[in-house]
Image (cartoon, grey):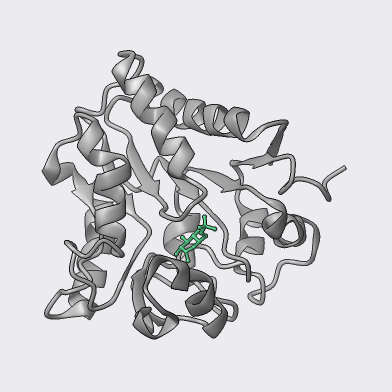
Amino acid sequence: MRLVICETIEEFGEKAAQAIAAQIRAKSNSVLGLPTGDTPIRVYNELVKLYNENYIDFQYVTTFNLDEYLGMDKENPSSYNYFMWNNLFRHINISNEKVHIPDGKASDPHKECSDYEDSINGLGGLDLMVLGIGLNGHIGFNEPGTNFDSRTRVVELAESTISANARNFNSSDEVPRQAITMGIATIMAAKKILLLATGEGKAQIVYDAFNKNISTEIPASVLQYHKDVHIILDKEAGRYFK
Ligand code: GLP
């Protein structure tokens, strides 16, 4: 495990973007797993900058997003699909057919999940999985109690996740109760993992994930089993690490 605690939020964005850029520069046809949320926004901004400076090229890159709300139309501004196009994809030269985001409106969500797994495996798996962390320790939408052998599937969201994510909707009543998420085993199969967290609110959970016993009660604690994890935090999120 490699831990970097950044002095400023700007440094956090730059370091995290550099870590992703290094993967793309080392392997131009990298397969990336990508998260949504507030945490990666500045990282995506930095990646767009690096692309505009001709430092990285997305032509051969393939991406798989971690999750999407079930029943969510991709044109909806609260969808993760909309988020990804708005914050990253429309600003870079990635080809449409190399972008994968679970389809929240799939007529057969269970088939959508198994097809998603097949597509990842068909490309030889994820080279780099970039993750945020939920306040309750979730990764993707793998809530506390999730089995570590879980794969891409339909899940119920925890009440605390619904409240935390209500900020992206008009009210918590509008937050979908279900989602499609990559499973813990899907995430753990990635060759490398980059975990990102910022802000004081994440300080305790990110510390617990790497310093308490591995337990399904803190889904991110499973990352202690992974051989190649890089953690990048800002000063506030890293405050409990010595
Ligand atoms: C959501 C996503 C997660 C993300 C988490 C943290 O629930 N499903 O993938 O890591 O929120 O988001 P934020 O970065 O906004 O704190």
Where on the picture, by quarter, is residue 225? bottom right
**Outermost residue to the front:** 170
**Outermost residue to the right:** 242
Assign the C terminus to one quadrant of the image. Answer: top right
The percent position of residue 123, horizontal first and vertical second, equals 25, 45
Residue 206 can be seen, yes or no? no
Seen at 32% across and 43% down, the residue is 87
Residue 127 can be seen, yes or no? yes
Q: How many marks?
A: 0
- Horizontal side of residue 63 vs 212, given as left or right: left
Seen at 78% across and 67% down, the residue is 213
Assign the N terminus to one quadrant of the image. Answer: top right
Where on the picture, by quarter, is residue 94? top left
The percent position of residue 27, horizontal first and vertical second, equals 35, 25
Seen at 47% across and 30% down, the residue is 17
The percent position of residue 15, horizontal first and vertical second, equals 57, 28
- Horizontal side of residue 237 vs 141, given as left or right: right
Where on the picture, by quarter, is residue 56? top left
The percent position of residue 112, horizontal first and vertical second, equals 20, 71
- Horizontal side of residue 131 vs 228, given as left or right: left
- Horizontal side of residue 54 vs 231, given as left or right: left
Relative to the observer, which residue lies in front, 51 or 30? 51
Q: Does residue 36 lie above or below 175 as drawn?
A: above
